[in-house]
Image (spheres, rainbow, N blue to C red):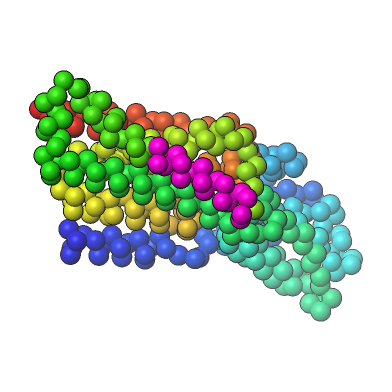
Amino acid sequence: MILLVLPIVMMLLFGYAVTTEIKNTNFAVLDYSKDNYTTEIVNKLRSSECFIFTDNFTNYKQVEDAFKTGKIGIVIVFEENFYENFLHTGTASVQILADGSDPNIAKTLVTYASSIISRYLQDRNPNPNTIQMLPGIKFLYNPQLKGAYNAVPGVIGMIIMLICAMMTAVSIVREKEKGTMEVLLVSPMRPIFVIIAKLLPYFSISTINVFNIFIISHFIMDVPIAGNLFWIIVLCFLYIVVSLGIGLLISSVANTQVVALLISGMVLMLPAVYMSGMMFPIENMPLILRVLSNVIPARWFVSAIRKIMIMGVDVRYVAKEMMILTGMIVTLIVVSLKKFKIRLE
């Protein structure tokens, strides 16, 4: 497994998932002018591999809702009389709105969009020396473009996954190797209570770590907690339980600590880091990796915690992520308990 499978996994992840290129980013348009120039600019953006056109908005309320749901990464706003102003004065005012919760991606998207628009206007102007584009660039939710806004949600996801899943799997398998698990099983205690007792310490440790991260990020790194703290805690608890369920599932199929570590590293940690949107945008990946990322709990947790903690959205905008995590909890626990009981019998 280490000699043959791991190199293939590493090659696929580093070759396709780890990339700084920006592709397939959804964008929308708020066009107050609706003339030929704005239509052609939108077509130029659509023809680029960096952007995928999603919608034409009619007001800023639609723009806000789209950003909160995570449907778009950038919005282009054209002023009224765009064509007339450009034709008579040589100036054009365009506002570019980007989601600043991930500052690196936001800056790259704004640079791409500004370059495409400027190049189009220069091509249409017979005297490029007189052209002037007046972009109103606005980074929502992170106007200072602080990297900590993007790093903290990812760090929470990594720490919880590391402690809950990997440590839980290794600890239970260690009990099997030493033979102490069989000693517990011959006791009057039911197996379900043995499992719960093994999971509780890591649940408690992960909870303490989450609170420590919030304290450090908020009071030392100046990362805001813009959303409802109650729902942030609920979301973290859901993710902790999912991670514990993954660790329990690994322990049910592994018979040695080495196998548990191998499964955790290959099947859990590498995909969680590189295919969850924690470090690299999912939109840049090939279709098969984007599909596979749907089964990675960290993807849904990182997306939801960014929305609530950084963007300050209402809980209804992360209902999808919370429902998916809840479904994963039920599935993992049912499968793990079933396999655990079969193994014990």
Q: Is residue 70 left or right of residue 334?
A: right
Name the side, left or right, on which 255 lies relative to 203: left
Percent coordinates x, y for residue 62 in the rendering: 69, 39
Q: Residue furthest right?
A: 88
Please provide percent x and percent y for residue 74.
Answer: 64, 53
Question: Is residue 208 part of the magenta span, yes or no?
Answer: yes
Residue 225's place in the image compared with 86, above or below, is above
Picture residue at 28% right of the left edge, 54% below the top: 265
Q: Is residue 256 above or below residue 322?
A: below
Extreme residue in the top direction: 188
User: Which quadrant does the N terminus fall into?
Assistant: bottom left
Q: Which residues are magenta?
A: 204-221
Q: Quadrant of residue 168?
A: top left
Residue 183 appears in the figure: yes
Picture layout, residue 85 above or below residue 205 = below
Front one among 136 and 117? 136
- Is residue 216 rendered magenta in the image? yes
Could you tell me residue 289's position as x and y percent? 37, 53
Residue drawn at x 19%, y 22% is 189
Is 316 positioned to the left or the right of 10 in the image?
A: right
Majority SS type along the magenta span: helix
Instruction: Give the residue displayed 40% in from the left and 60% down from the top.
Output: 17
Along the line of sight, which residue is nearer the eye, 211 or 252? Answer: 211
Asked if residue 242 shows in the view, the reply is: no
Residue 315 x, y percent position in the rendering:
58, 32
Q: Residue at x 59, y 40 (%)?
A: 308
Which corner quadrant holds the C terminus?
Answer: top left
Residue 335 vs residue 297: left or right? left
Task: Give whichever of 261, 60 is nearer the camera.
Answer: 261
